[in-house]
Amino acid sequence: MQRNTETNKQLFNGFSAPDNEQINRALAIIAQIPDDPHYFRPKGIEVAAILMDFNVDLKTILAAILSDPRLAHLNPSPNIKEQFGETVATLVNDVNWLNKLTVYSLEMTDQPSQAETLRRMLLSMTQDVRAVLIKLAYRIQRLKILPKESYELRRFIAQETLDIYAPIANRMGIHQLKWELEDMAFRYLKPQSYRRIAKSLSDNRIQRENCINKFIGLLQQKLAEEGITAEIYGRPKHIYSIWKKMQRKQLDIDELYDLLAVRVIVDNLTNCYAALGVVHSLWQIIPKEFDDYIANPKENGYQSLHTVILDPEGNRIEVQIRTQQMHDFAELGVAAHWSYKEGGKHDTAIEKNIASLRKLLEETSPERNRKEDSDEVLSQNFRSELFNDRVYVLTPAGKIIDLVKGSTPLDFAYAIHTEIGHRCRGAKINGRIAPLTYTLKSGDQVKILTAKDGGPNHNWIDPNLGYLKTSAAISKVKSWFKNQQQAQNMAAGKAILDKESQRLGLKTINLAELAKHFHQPDTDKLLEAIGRSDITSRQLAAFFKIPELETPPAAAQRKKSEAKSAISVEGIDNVLTTLAHCCSPIQGNDIIGYVSHKKGITIHRKDCENILHLSPEKQAQLISVNWGAKRASYAVPIVVHAFNSQNVLSDVTQILAQAKIHISNAALETHPDLSAQLNLTIQIENTDQLSQVLNKISQLPNIVDAKRKT
């Protein structure tokens, strides 16, 4: 059992009495975990202790303590939502998910786009930004105890830290965590380089300190003479950033001249520029090294004045000047905003980057005992406002695909490769068969089931059926049908001309001359125009001065294709079948048969929920079926929503009558606000006919929408 409960309690001094009571309850839960001398992973209380340096709020501390991985083995497991509220429970769930995530691979080091997509995925799937902050603290603690792990695991975790977590800390503006993550990871990846730089910094420490102290003393004196109150101190250069600069400039550490750095903290914006003026008046400046990140903040909201000067001994010293508020943001980023409520007009750049986060924090007070009345609502706003347009799904190999929210497995297939999209016939989501209209969620793993050949279905580009969301995928399907039609028309046109040459006894026909005569840009366009009857048989006959040609094969084929179809079972027609009422399949749907001992063969859509959830024993009763060659109609339920019930029934039935579609059932429901819902069962021959009539109904002025009822 935990034996240091009192020591643990002392870690969290500074909270109010009611808050301490909640912390003590969380510590009491942790105390139930049996001691295990072989457990070398981060513990929740260690992570919470790290976060105390960031002045975070109570719920963040509670979530850090209660996200301890060992709690999963307690029986019974604690009800965190009941004891500590929904926000803490959500944070704990998010942190546990982040701690278990295994998407990263070492190949991402050479695939920057995949690493960036994974970072976005992590941020999109956490409902509260504080969960990411807790995860970063977990990673700090993981790196501290990493020497106990194998060499391969040390390198893997260190590289993952540099590729994923340090950039996230930088994006959130938590530079203190970023630098610590980078230096600790670098120590495991390149221990010799790390030790060499650390030793060089240590060897020259006294010389650097003397130089910095002399600079600080003179600047402090001159600022005081100008009436400017400032805190000035030397800023250590971080080992990983030094190494990166050495690599970038191809210089040894002894050749770097900007290892000296000073930070100046003043009390207001005006004094930032006043202090800069004093610095520039006292020392020689290097003009190309000046940056005004106050007037032009960095993308993550960072603000400061940067300048580099030369002292009388020729030492280059970097000087950063900022207000305390800018400093807090630079060092702690979003965590700093839990420390106090900001006053006055917010900076535009910072607002742009963390606008939703501020909504979460503006109800806080300067003390740790914060107001949290609207915490959960605002936390949800943070997620929905920043990440409401993307989903991140995984291939079976672990590659992350970035898609528009609302995308389907078909969109995923086309994002992988156009041909995979064309030949897609099904999908498994997280190991289970799912319909192609399934709406993907971030974190889903998708496996596409393909045919050896074949192409897309016309239904896929019907907006009423919901197969495709992304414009890129829809464009690829339309392009495929266009190319197929062009190829068919060209083949038909060539057949017509071949037949013509035989009739005339000609060995060849001058296609270029023929194209020119009919004003076609090339011979392919000529054949296509002939095949689709834009150039008629009468026009060709006039050109060759012969009797009119027979009806083009393409047109005859189109007439033949108008024949409607029934159902064949494993290639045999005239088998007695029944259409399932649960999914109401119609011609054009992908279908499958289910052999029932009482009802014979029942025909279902392949994406029918009843088929997708059959037990393994009953799956043996499925049989292959196809639409046959007989004309048939099918009962399909549809629902129409209208702004106003007046004339809705007559308007809809008129459209159905014009389309010669029989209505077998109709029911109109009206509501107190005069809106209406019209439920109809209509006899439909195929999905194309259904789509056309739904589109026509939707275009009526009084209609909200019209769709197939599921």
Image (spheres, grey):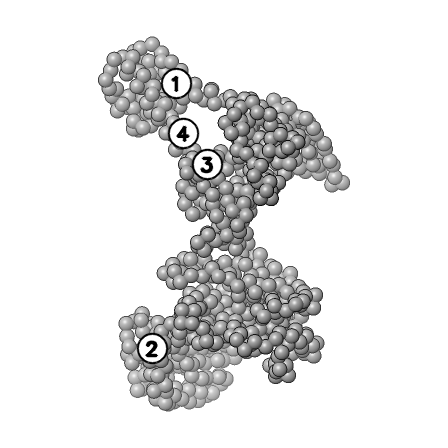
Viewer-side label of 2, 1 = 2
Q: Label 2 near label 3: C-beta < 8 Å? A: no
Q: Are marks 1 and 3 in contact (CB under 8 Å)?
A: no
Disc with the residue nearer the chain's start (2 vs 1): 2
* Percent of width and height locating residue 671: 74, 39
Residue 552 circle label: 1
- For label 3, the residue is 456
Image position, residue 64 (x, y; %): 58, 71
Alpha carbon separation for disc pair 3 and 2: 57 Å
Residue 571: tell me if it is visible.
Answer: yes
Q: Residue at x 53, y 23 (%)?
A: 573
The amino acid type, in three-letter code, at marker 2 is: Gln
Locate residue 62 relative to residue 469 in the image: left or right: right
Read off the residue under disc 2: 192
Residue type for callout 4: Gln
Which residue is painted at 69% across and 34% down in the image? 678
How packed is label 1: few (under 14 Cα within 10 Å), some, or many (20 or more)? Answer: some
Disc 3, SS: loop
Q: Which residue is mark 4?
A: 485
The reply to whether discs 3 and 4 touch (Cβ–Cβ < 8 Å) is: no
Q: CA distance from mark 2 to mark 1?
A: 79 Å
- Which of 256 and 186 lies nearest the eye of the viewer? 186
